[in-house]
Image (tube, rainbow, N blue to C red):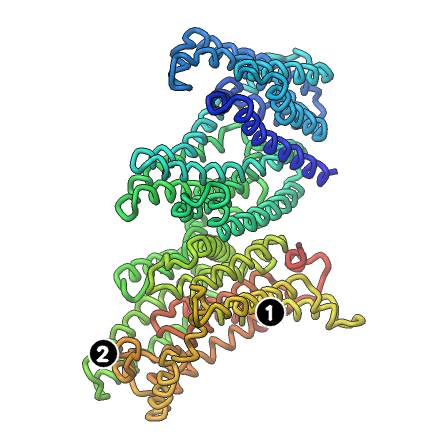
Amino acid sequence: MRRLNYLTTFMAEGLVIGSYLLAFRLVALFSGPQGFGEYSLSRRTLSLLMPVAVVGVDLGVARYVSYAQADKSGKSPGYVAAGLIVLAAGVGIVSAILLVAPGFWGEVFFGSSSYGSLVLALPPLLAGGGLHVIAFGYLRGLNRIQAANVLMAINMGLLPLGAIVLVHGSVLWVLDAMGIGWTVVSGLALATLPINFRGIRERLRELTRFGVPRTPGEFVSLLLFAMPGILVAHSADIRVAGMVAFGVAAVSMIGSGLTPISFVLLPVAARLLAAGKVRQLRFEVVDVVGITLAATLVLVVLLEVFAAPIVEIYLGPNFKSSVDILRLTLIGALPWAAYITLRSVIDARHVKPINARNLVISFLLAVVLAFVLRRVADPTTSAVLAFVLALWLLAGLTMIEANRIANIFAKPQPRTRVEVARLATLAALPIAILVSSPQRPAVALVISFGYIVMALFSFRLSRANSLMLAYVGLVAAWMTISWLRSTYLLHLNSEQLSYGTQKFEYFVFVVLPMAAAVAIIVEQVEDVWPIGASQLAIGGVMALITVALLGDKILGYARYSWQGDLIALGTLIAVQPWLVRNIWASAAIGVLGIGGIMFAGARQSLVAFALALVLSAAYWAAARYLRETRGKPNAVRKALAGQYVALPLVLVLLTGGAIAFTYHWTPTSYCYCVTDRLISLESNAGDRDKLLYRGFQLLAQDPILGSGLGSFAGAIQDSLSPGHFYQYPHNVPLEIASETGLIGFFLIFAPLVAGWLSLLRAGIQRGSPAIAGVMMIVSVFFVVANLSGDIPSERGLWVFGILAFKLGIDAFGLRVTSPSKTSPVVKAAQVS
């Protein structure tokens, strides 16, 4: 029944959207440009005035009727009576204001006082529309979703078309016919339902307390979507503003397609909350939101990829130059879909206008950003980007509140300020690692100090923390000895000494303390989820933007590798049954990640991504074998048949297919993707062979103690940049071995690898999605460190590597219980 409700609601909404588009076409055909303008402006004005006349009574009726049905209080008919009284007052006041000065409002809404007659058509429309939303809300609250869908299809789908076809001589007559039709049909629907006035004062107080504060939020939502076009119209020509408005309308249309979920979810959430069934609500929300966002993501990616032909076919070839504006605007569709889907859960739980508050906050951010971003971007880009970022903030605020209600992430909620600060510190880690580069040592030092302070509040004297700190101290001591030896005993030139000193200072005084602090803050592997959620969000957004802009280096050309790394990290976390617990949502993000990595152009990110996918498949195959299929017939085959075993392997095949498909463009043309850089290796290996050879030469000179920190600098010339010399071999393990000796190499990597293997073993035995997520992050940074970067720049390897080392110590020697069907960790791994 639940799936049938969603399906029929989507069908009804699809009929309404199709009818809406067809209505405009028919009006243009019957009434020409003049009638088309009158009809479209009248519908727009109606959508603007409806929230004022209805004052949130539609949501209120659906919510309170659902609660009344759940507790069997018999109050449902009273809420409808109260809703009709509130509606009569709202429509009466708005109508009186309109009818007192129709010429003035004609000037305001239609641009001329001569359109005062159209203003006269608004009161019947408001009355009929108001009766419709009350009847619709009442049926939703009673869980009579099919009847509500029929009402929606008749009133909003068939009646407008019937009015246009039967009464097409005048737009005014069409509007009057629509208003009368809505009133009659909705009145008949209400007449078949019980309505009484018992306890009417209490019902009125509840409805107005719920609905009236939400009205400003509806206005702010309209303003948020109107703002980009208005700002661009004042700063650029009307053609550009029209394209911006077209993109905003596309985002709004995608949201409209998801309103059926909001319609159905509100009464469902209200009944479950009234019954105290929060766990069941969580499963409902996770299931619905996962499917919805996966479908929206696929749609957005398709629109981003095919934006150019869509614009050319729909608007004509003269609009091809505005395709990038559309692509940038469409990035806001995903967060808007999240808001549309989850807002009903918040309305079901809270009487306070939480959604309205979040809309106001997001709108204020959009206004501020629209002007601040003009310093770094043109007015059009700044307006659109401000709109998109505001929608992402709105989605974030909505998801935080929905998580408080339904515990979507199935994680304990922070209760104290220290816990909130700890969660925020962990969530900010991916950004902190990205920002704290060796080129900004002062900023990096401040960030590292912040994590150290947080670690002091979280420190516990445990075996894992003690051994981790001992390891960090030992590494720092050996690096200090190597630096002193390089400075005072070896004969290095000034360039080598300068680079070696910078490397030593940043690694010992910034990277190692920050890594130790993060390891202390994370007490157990389950605490890593804020880092994973942040990494997932960043990677998803980065992939979406990269695909939308077809590979533009949004982090700068010097950081294209980071762009690819972030996409790979987010995608790999998404394909674990950890934070995204719907296999189709994981698959959608996986496909998006492939597109992002292809266009980012980072070869090392591609290699790390592919190898980590193989590791992920092996991890879940081994976990499934140990915990489920061992000892059963065809145990290995059944273990390999798991969804989260197959998904990474399918993504590997898709990645290979994408490379093979784009290969045929070269050498006569380019795909402007990573395939171009792979083919370039056929003619130029990028000096990697020379760098590796030089690294092994230095290792051979002094294999025990190394040739000294910075000794590699200035030895190999960059063949693509004459006069420029490499400072490091672009292989961190080789760099450590050649400059600090085999003692340094084994001192640093032997404990790390042992800790990682311990953690990996424990994760497989437990079937732990959290450990899988951590190992995906470590594997990406470790592979990249073998292909690019130097000791200080590969800070992600040290931060997450030492964290995994500490967690591996904690897991070593612990007894893993035998597999249990009731294990929550295993269940999480099996959710699809």
* Crowd tier of the residue under label 1, counting other residues whose Cα lies within 10 Å: few below 14, some 14–19, many 20 or above: many
Residue in front for this viewpoint, 58 or 659: 659
What residue sits right under mark 1 in the picture? 762
> Which residue is rendered at x = 58% and y = 50% of the image?
294
Residue in front for this viewpoint, 800 or 135: 135
What residue sits right under mark 2 in the picture? 723
Q: To which quarter of the image does residue 369 belong?
A: top left
Q: Quadrant of the C terminus?
A: bottom right
Q: Residue furthest bottom?
A: 701
Q: Quadrant of the N terminus?
A: top right
Distance from the alpha carbon under mark 1 to that under mark 2: 50 Å
The vertical placement of 369 against 69, above or below, is below
For the question of whether residue 64 can be seen, the reply is: no
Identify the secondary structure beneath mark 1: helix
Q: Residue 48, percent across and down?
A: 47, 23
Q: Residue 251, percent across and down?
A: 49, 40
Residue in front for this viewpoint, 386 or 735: 386
Q: Residue 27, percent across and down?
A: 54, 24
Q: Residue 569, percent across and down?
A: 48, 62
> Which residue is rendered at x = 39% and y = 35% of the image?
363
* Circle nearer the viewer, 1 or 2: 2
